[in-house]
Image (cartoon, rainbow, N blue to C red):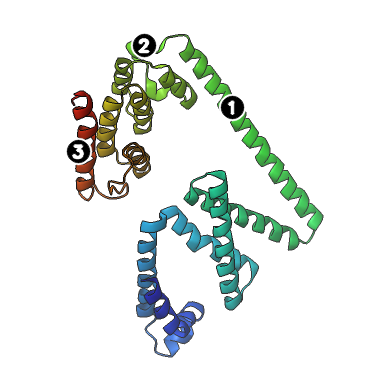
Amino acid sequence: MYALVGGFHFLFRDRFILISNNPEAAYARGINVRFWDFLFYLSFGIVITHSVNTAGVLLVFVFLVVPAIATMMITDKLWLQLVIGWTMGTLVSVIGLALSYYLDLPSGPTVVTTYGLVLLVLSLVLYIVRAENRMIAVRNVALGIATTILLAFIFYEGGHFFNHHDHTAAAVTTPQQTVNQHVDLDQMSDTAFAQFVQQLQTKKQLMDALTQVSDDFRRWEIIQRLIQVAPAEGYHEALHLLEATQIPLLRSEIYDAFKQAAGRDFGYDPFAEAQENSRSLRALKQWWHTTFQRGNGSGE
């Protein structure tokens, strides 16, 4: 698909460049500009549609926008824009993937963040280089960086301050008292909730807590603890959450837990619709029945 679109653009490159840079001249030559605009954007849309399925919306958007913005900031020459854009896209992607690998970070957000940092640094450098008074420009940049660091520090310390108070309030009661008093577990801070879950020791406590949480990520956090305490019930609840949640990232995390426990791949696609995964879900349920019901008589 990409080769076909690339060949199409290369074959009609002169016409596309003309209608982009000088549509009046294209009209004067009798070229149907609107029709060729339509073909260009149609082919572009096909590439984007196929790319989103592979890389995600945010990453595709960054690939499309950031190199183009960067090259237009540097030069007006089209051939040089292409060279810089292709080079920058390759290098920044490789650097982002390397950081993702060595720092154990998600690849998509890491590449997006790397592109953002590169564009920010490039903007600051060009601002200083092209300024009439470079000393003033350097001072402005330094002031902006200092202000950003100060704001980041304030928000960071503020988060710790409020988390500390949430933790203090949650620590005055036992986990069972927290559940029995119907405390809103969804409103706990992440730190307090994680500590609360780790304090739950019995299957009953965990199942009671599970009924009081609506957030899918927090339900999964409780289920992970339940798997440690009572694997049969834990994986059973994990199956229910896998079918119910509409969050692909969470489905991927839950499915990874099943693959690790079973030691095999069931062919489940976290980004597909439920109907497409029906066979995989049946296989997962069969694995649960085979592993737990036959092994210890545990039922649903």
Q: Amino acid at mark 1?
A: Gly
Report which quarter residue 45 is drawn in. Answer: bottom left
Q: Residues within 10 Å of mark 2 (few under 14, many from 20)?
A: some
Left or right position of 50 against 159? left
Res 195 visible: yes
Q: List the residue tagged with mark 2.
A: 176
Q: Secondary structure at mark 1?
A: helix
For image coordinates 39% across by 71% down, the residue present is 2
Q: Amino acid at mark 3?
A: Gln
Q: Residues within 10 Å of mark 1 (few under 14, many from 20)?
A: few
Q: Which mark is residue 158?
A: 1
Residue 151, percent from left and from top: 64, 36
**Which numbered disc, 3 or 2, marks the residue that appears first in the sequence?**
2
**Which numbered disc, 1 or 2, marks the residue that appears first in the sequence?**
1
Label 3, label 2: how far apart the Cα atoms are? 34 Å
For image coordinates 29% across by 32% down, the residue present is 238
Instruction: Look at the numbered discs 1 and 3 and tell me whether their residues touch, using CB distance below 8 Å.
Output: no
Of all residues, the one furthest to the bottom in this rendering is 29
Report which quarter residue 84 is drawn in. Answer: bottom right
Label 1, label 2: how far apart the Cα atoms are? 30 Å
Q: Quadrant of the C terminus?
A: top left
Q: List the residue tagged with mark 3.
A: 286
